[in-house]
Image (cartoon, helix red, strand yellow):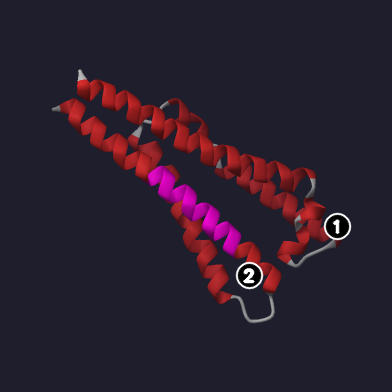
């Protein structure tokens, strides 16, 4: 019975971890879609082209978060959870590569890149911890 309670707790903690990252990602996406002019400078772009670029990022963020919805409903789905973790890890790695490849003189891009790295790394750590806790609880339930 105790293993079942731990599994239920782990399931809800995983659900909450994914939901928290999802909510922050979607709020960022919506801000990029609604007020792109507020964020274009952080990418060192401006005008119509800059606003379109930022809106495009907003659309990509929404696309990236599609698997989070079914994962929140069924966090025990190991494969789906691994897909979301892989997406998050690829985001951190790609953003870090972009950050490290920036030449000197791009303070706004560096600051924006660092914010993305920290945010996505935090989300990865939170969700990975929830995943491993859930996997441990599932292993206890099977014994």
Residue 110 shows which numbered tag?
Answer: 2
Across and down, in percent, residue 8 comes to: 32, 23
The kind of secondary structure the magenta stretch mainly shows is helix
Disc 1 versus disc 2: distance between alpha carbons?
Answer: 22 Å
Residue 83 shows which numbered tag?
Answer: none
Decide which of 59, 5 is in the foreground and name it: 5
Give the answer, above or below, for where 79 lies relative to 125: above
Name the residue: 24% across, 31% down.
Answer: 138
> Which residue is identified by label 1?
48
Residue 117 located within the stretch drawn in magenta: yes
View extreme (right): residue: 47
- Decide which of tag 1 and tag 2 comes sooner along the chain: 1
Residue 106 location, quadrant: bottom right
Q: Is residue 91 visible?
A: yes
Q: Quadrant of the N terminus?
A: top left
Q: Quadrant of the C terminus?
A: top left
Name the residue: 56% across, 75% down.
Answer: 101
Find numbered disc 2 in the image and state the secondary structure of the residue it sits on: helix
Across and down, in percent, residue 92 comes to: 49, 58
Q: Which residues are magenta?
A: 114-128
Decide which of 123, 102 is in the foreground and name it: 123
- Left or right of 119? Residue 139 is left
What crowding class fits label 1: few (fewer than 14 Cα within 10 Å), some (14-19), or many (20 or more)?
few
Tally the numbered discs: 2
Give the answer, above or below, for where 54 lies relative to 77: below
Residue 44 location, quadrant: bottom right
View extreme (top): residue: 1
Name the residue: 61% across, 76% down.
Answer: 102
Across and down, in percent, residue 127 comes to: 42, 43
Residue 49 location, quadrant: bottom right
Residue 63 located within the stretch drawn in magenta: no
What crowding class fits label 2: few (fewer than 14 Cα within 10 Å), some (14-19), or many (20 or more)?
some
């Amino acid at each position: 019975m105790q293993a079942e309670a731990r599994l239920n707790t782990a399931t809800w903690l995983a659900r909450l971890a994914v939901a928290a990252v999802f909510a922050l990602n979607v709020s960022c996406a919506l801000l990029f879609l609604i007020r792109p002019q507020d964020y274009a400078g952080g990418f060192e772009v401006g005008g119509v082209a800059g606003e379109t670029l930022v809106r495009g990022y907003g659309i990509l963020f929404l696309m990236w978060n599609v698997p989070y919805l079914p994962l929140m409903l069924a966090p025990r789905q190991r494969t789906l959870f691994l897909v979301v973790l892989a997406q998050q890890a690829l985001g951190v790695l790609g953003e870090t590569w972009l950050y490290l490849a920036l030449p000197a003189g791009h303070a706004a891009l560096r600051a924006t890149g660092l914010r993305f790295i920290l945010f996505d790394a935090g989300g990865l750590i939170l969700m990975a911890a929830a995943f491993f806790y859930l996997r441990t609880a599932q292993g206890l339930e099977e014994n």
